[in-house]
Image (cartoon, helix red, strand yellow):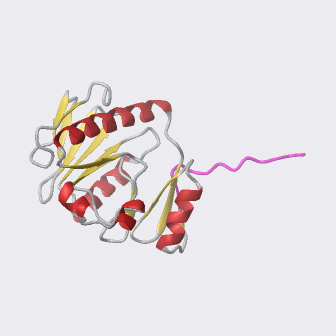
Amino acid sequence: MDTETLSLPSPLALTVDLTDEQFFQLCQNNRDYQFERTVNGELIIMSPTGGDTGNRNIELAYQLQAWSRQNKLGKAFDSSTGFKLPNGAERSPDASWITIERWNTLTPEQREKFIPLCPDFVVELRSPSDSLKKLQEKMQEYLENGAKLGWLIDKKQQQVEIYRPEQPVEILTSPKTLSGEDVLPEFILDLKYILY
């Protein structure tokens, strides 16, 4: 019996008409994959990350959570958290954070599903299969929806792009640390195990 293997691009983008509840259930029923949905309703399906990216991601989440737990100024989230942005897109940054004031405005039901707001702070780690252009567009989308600070960490190019509202993107080459500035007071991300 001859079989053919179907090779699909990663990430895979499909246009599917789903309600918010159907999209949420799709994500819950297929936890081995990560889903996002663009403002135009395009469904983006991403496979689990490779070992290197997963390790860098947990290091990032670990440092952000340790800082967040210590100062209690807000809530930190990992890459499995979905956010429904004001423009209608549903995104899952690799790490994110929102102020405690904004978190406290959410109902228990809103906290259990995709969080209906844009994080104050977002980070995207570029994995080998990620398009830099698509990630840059996603970072701009976060800013347009209310993010106050964003980092795009690109190990391949040894660069970090820093996104701030109404400012040009700042590009740092081979930085050792990143400052959370006034958005994440006194947070310093050590890039030793993330960028190198």
Residue 111 among those drawn in magenta: no
Residue 112 against residue 34 in the figure, above or below: below
What residue is at 30 percent from the left and 70 percent from the top?
Answer: 86
Left/right placement of residue 189 relative to residue 56 reads left
Q: Nearer the viewer, residue 117 or 12?
A: 117
Q: Nearer the viewer, residue 147 or 140?
A: 147
Q: Nearer the viewer, residue 178 or 109?
A: 109
What residue is at 29 percent from the left and 49 percent from the top?
Answer: 96
What residue is at 43 percent from the left and 49 percent from the top?
Answer: 80
Q: Which residues are magenta?
A: 1-13
Residue with the most extreme front position: 108
Residue 105: where, in percent of width, then height? 24, 66
Residue 31: where, in percent of width, then height? 55, 51
Residue 131 against residue 36 in the figure, above or below: above
Query: So how many labels did they put on this image?
Result: 0
Residue 50 against residue 96 in the figure, above or below: above
Instruction: Report the quarter where the C terminus lies.
Output: top left
Q: Nearer the viewer, residue 167 or 47?
A: 47
Residue 8: where, in percent of width, then height? 61, 51
Quarter occupied by residue 146: bottom left
Magenta residues, dominant SS class: loop
Residue 116 against residue 62 in the figure, above or below: below
Residue 68: where, in percent of width, then height? 22, 42
Quarter occupied by residue 95: top left
Residue 2 among those drawn in magenta: yes
